[in-house]
Amino acid sequence: MQPIDTARRRLLQLLGAVGGVFAAKQAHAHHTDTHFDDKSEHQIVYQCNKADDSYLSSVLFSVGEMIRKYGDNVEVVVACFGPGIQLLGDPPERPIRQELQQRASSLSAYGVRFHACGNTIDSLGWTEQNLVDYAVVVPIGVDDIMQLQERGFSYFSW
């Protein structure tokens, strides 16, 4: 078995990510505007607490795959706190590839909710104006995850 070189690996990751975004465009979530007003058969919350490009790419790819597989029958929340809040920064203070923020924006158009931890925002001296327009501020990110789990959401962490 030959090792995959870095350029080939990045190309495969990019192709997979693009495929996930295109697949997500095929799913038309009927709950995009009122995400929690109806009950989907599946609910999942992703923990997003790192600003590393590879980590963020993996989280967003997985989210896209869930939307591709379940379409409008899954509710997805990405809970961003700590360094992961940078994904929702407008602009982020840490270097986040623009492609990753574009993928997050595209996923939000298909009903994926991106929750921003109010405590993290306060610790950075940010306000809601420092966030992308699709971010939903929650008081405490970890409490948000717990409450979503209590409502039946599965929890996923990388």
Image: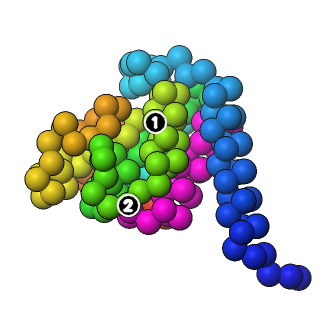
Q: Nearer the viewer, mark 1 or mark 2?
A: 2
Instruction: Give the residue at mark 1.
Output: 105
Query: Which is more toward the observer, 114 or 70?
Result: 114
Q: For this view, does 144 lie left or right of residue 55? A: left
Query: Which is more toward the observer, 153 or 115?
Result: 115
Q: Residue at x 37, y 40 (%)?
A: 114
- Extent of the magenta region: 49-69
Q: Secondary structure at mark 1?
A: helix
Residue flagged by tag 2: what amino acid is it?
A: Pro
Q: For this view, does 4 lie left or right of residue 32? A: right
Instruction: Give the residue at mark 2.
Output: 95
User: Against 14, is 35 above or below?
Assistant: above
User: Against 26, is 64 above or below?
Assistant: below
Which numbered tag is attached to residue 68? none
Q: Secondary structure at mark 2?
A: loop
The quarter of the picture where the N terminus appears is bottom right
Confirm or deny contact between disc 1 and disc 2 (CB under 8 A).
no
Indicate the quadrant where residue 128 lies.
Answer: top left
User: Against 86, is 88 above or below?
Assistant: above
Q: Earlier in the sequence, mark 1 or mark 2?
A: 2
Q: Alpha-carbon distance for marks 1 and 2? A: 17 Å
Q: How many residues crowd mark 1 within 10 Å: few (<14), some (14–19), many (20+)?
A: some
Residue flagged by tag 1: what amino acid is it?
A: Ser
Residue 60 placement (x, y as % from top left):
53, 49
Residue 127 placement (x, y as % from top left):
14, 42
Q: Main secondary structure of the magenta part?
A: helix
Q: Residue at x 31, y 31 (%)?
A: 133
Examine the structure image and report whether residue 36 is included in the region drawn in magenta. no
Residue 14 placement (x, y as % from top left):
67, 54
